[in-house]
Image (spheres, rainbow, N blue to C red):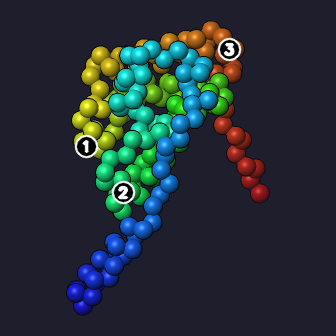
Amino acid sequence: MIKKILIALLVVLVAIQFVRPARNVSADTTKDISTLYPMPDSVKVVVNKACADCHSNKTVYPWYASVAPLSFWLDHHVNEGKGEINFNEFASYRIGKQNHKLKEVIEQIQENKMPLSSYTLIHKEAKLTDAEKEILIDWCQNIMDTIKAKYPADSLKSKRPPAPAAK
């Protein structure tokens, strides 16, 4: 019985190797955050090393990204990260959402929640130093200050769609 289960498991593992999630490799930067706000080279370096794989439209995939079920896990991880904030789509966000997302970035960095430990476990270079954290935090805060100076206070709130009416 155990032999049959192991054979079935092996067949499933081999079969899922032929199912490939779509790759996140767009070069479109027309809605990139840098089209709205200056991104100094020091910030680009930090974002590229610690954020871009999960928070942009261009992921650099490691060799194991072609091996299922890891490929599915990575695809889910990237899509989840892009769902939180996507630096390549940032210019398409409403101003309130931009402000809110930048505030969340600051909080995540300050609380050492980003980059994720599961990511830095394999990508040691993505661990942020205190100086790199300050670079990102200062950059985000400067953008938030720019937004605050340019737009009325009520537009800075992240508006959520109204809840459906109860029936």
Q: Which residue is mark 3?
A: 151
Task: Please state which of residues 145 and 8 is positioned toward the viewer in this rendering.
Answer: 8
In what quadrant of the picture does the C terminus appear?
Answer: bottom right
Dots 2, 3 in contact, CB < 8 A:
no
| Residue 138 appearing in the image | yes
Foreground pick, 101 / 123 = 123
Q: Can you tell which of label 1 and label 2 is closer to the viewer?
A: 2
Is residue 142 left or right of 115 when viewed as pictured? right
Up-down: is 30 above or below 54? above
- Against 4, is 83 above or below? above
The amino acid pointed to by label 3 is: Tyr
Q: Say which label, 1 or 2, has the lower sequence index.
A: 2
Mark 3 surroundings within 10 Å by alpha-carbon count, few (fewer than 14), some (14 through 19), many (20 or more)? few
Judged by depth in the image, the label closer to the viewer, 3 or 1, is: 1
Count neighbours of disc 1 (C-alpha within 10 A) and say few if under 14, some if 14 to 19, many if 20 or more.
few
Q: Which residue is mark 2?
A: 66
Residue 84 visible from this viewpoint: no
- The alpha-carbon separation of the residues under discs 1 and 2 comes to 16 Å
Closer to us: mark 2 or mark 3?
2
> Which residue is painted at 43% across and 41% down in the image?
59
Tell me which amino acid carries mark 1. Answer: Ile
Left or right: where 138 falls relative to 146: left
Callout 2 amino acid: Ser
In-image side of 164 versus 96 (left or right): right
Residue 35, percent from left and from top:
59, 21
Could you give the CA–CA distance between mark 3 and mark 1, rounded to whole angstroms? 41 Å
Sequence order check, earlier mark of 3 and 1: 1
Rendered image quadrant of residue 161:
top right
As drawn, the residue found furthest toward the front would be 27
